[in-house]
Amino acid sequence: MFITKKHLSRRTVLRGMGATVGLPLLDAMVPAGTALAATAAKPTPYMACVYVPHGAVMANWMPKTTGKDYEISPILKPLEPFRSQLTIVSGLRNKAAESPAPHAITPGTWLTAVHPPHQQAPDVGPSVDQVAARVLSKSTPLISLEVAGEGGGGACDPDFGCGYSGTIAFRTASQPLPMEQDPRTVFTNLFGEGNTMQERAAILREDGSILDFVRASAKDLQQSLGPSDRRMVGDYLDSVRDVERRVQGMEAKFASGTGMKLPNAPEGIPQDYGRMLDLMFSMISLAWQANMTRVATFMMAREVTMRTFPNLGITAAWHPLSHHGNDPDKLVQLTKIQNYMTNSFAGFVKRLAHTPDGDGTLLDHSLILFGSDMSNSDMHNHDPLPEVLLGRCCGTVKGGQHLHYPQDTPHANLLLTMLHRAGIPAKSHGVSTGELSEI
């Protein structure tokens, strides 16, 4: 690091090209001669949870040996360049996802680790990403970012309704968060609308005045409602406050700074699925680099997806193929699909590994859960789950190892461990029984 007399605030922003964004963590934000860990510039971890439907061919996912000298498996092979940042966690079970309606509740129980009651309205949250976001994103314009690789709700069930299959993020027990499928919408939510700086500022001011009216009207309405309706309006006001935070945060960025060039906003939903995944991963990394939020969730495909993969020579749809009946040819095709999803994720990891952030990279300061809430898709079971962690989480995660836990170790323990490694002193999460100290 160069020793200078200049000291930039961590809140310093850049303005230019019709957009204003935050700076990554720079050496100039650390007072001269001061250790990074002893300053306000100490990195705050980033957290993401990336979901793949329909489980995995576990024989091709889980390495045959544990420890540091394991041979990486075929499905995880694209992550080998990041071996020192990779933690493979095997043997975990998520009892919360077990039911006669696996596709209907599997996504919604992955990050909550709570089994939903038999009712149409959702009741499982909050998800681990939202618990983390309340702490990690308390000073960013957006609390969190939720994106999806394809639209559609997935699956519904007469006992559990439709609230759990289309999202993995829950703000509260009864408030699932929608996963945005349009990359252009994600971009404008992050960086504002309009072609020029003046247009963006005017739109933000207009949004702010509308929010003032909505908030005041909702508060007046609450006085005349019963307890249940007041809670519902309270959840709505929480959502309004989050939008208000975004508006205020963007207005602050317009008020000061110099300039940073952003890529052009995406045109919309691309036809090519690989391009779609890459765009969404780009949105997450850009949001982190610009300090717009610290937490993201990405549902790469929905449950019961009928997507095909002609680029892999696979014409059968993913969901029917997942009911493989141990057919060797179908298992080969499923392995190809799952390797393809890992390869797309590996592109995101590479981008983070090459993006400087203070005394390291975005990957050094990240904790990313990648995997599924289903194991053998033919059996629809949830034990053992295919899951890995990427990133060192600012030095709190060891990395470079394959850990295998005893039968019936709760998946919730991994979620609790993620919170602890990110510096969040949660006592429990879902049905957790303790943290996984080996991580």
Image (tube, rainbow, N blue to C red):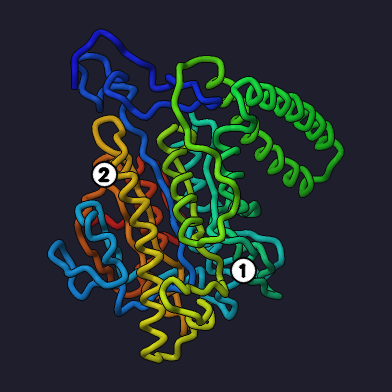
Q: Earlier in the sequence, mark 1 or mark 2?
A: 1
Q: Which residue is mark 2?
A: 396
* Quadrant in the rendering for residue 12: top left
Q: Is residue 343 left or right of residue 107?
A: left
Q: Residue at x 31, y 49 (%)?
A: 350
The amino acid type of the residue labelled 1 equals: Gly
* Quadrant in the rendering for residue 385: bottom left
Q: Residue at x 45, y 21 (%)?
A: 259
**Between 244 and 18, which is closer to the camera in this rendering?**
18
The amino acid type of the residue labelled 2 equals: Thr
Measured from the top left, where is residue 280 in percent x and y? Answer: 49, 50
Taking the image as drawn, is residue 110 in sight? yes
Measured from the top left, where is residue 57 in percent x and y? Answer: 36, 78
Q: Residue at x 79, y 35 (%)?
A: 218
CA gap between label 1 and label 2 equals: 36 Å
Label 1 or label 2, whichever lies nearer to me, is 1
Q: Which mark is residue 154?
A: 1
Q: Residue at x 46, y 60 (%)?
A: 274
> Is the residue 223 above or below the residue 58 in the image?
above
Mark 1, Cα crowd under 10 Å, few <14 / some 14-19 / many 20+, is many
**Looking at the image, do the residues carrying marks 1 and 2 touch, with CB atoms under 8 Å apart?**
no
In what element is the residue under mark 1?
loop
Q: Which mark is residue 220?
A: none
Measured from the top left, where is residue 188 in percent x and y? Answer: 60, 38
Quadrant (top left, top right, bottom left, bottom right) of the C terminus: bottom left
Taking the image as drawn, is residue 113 in sight? no
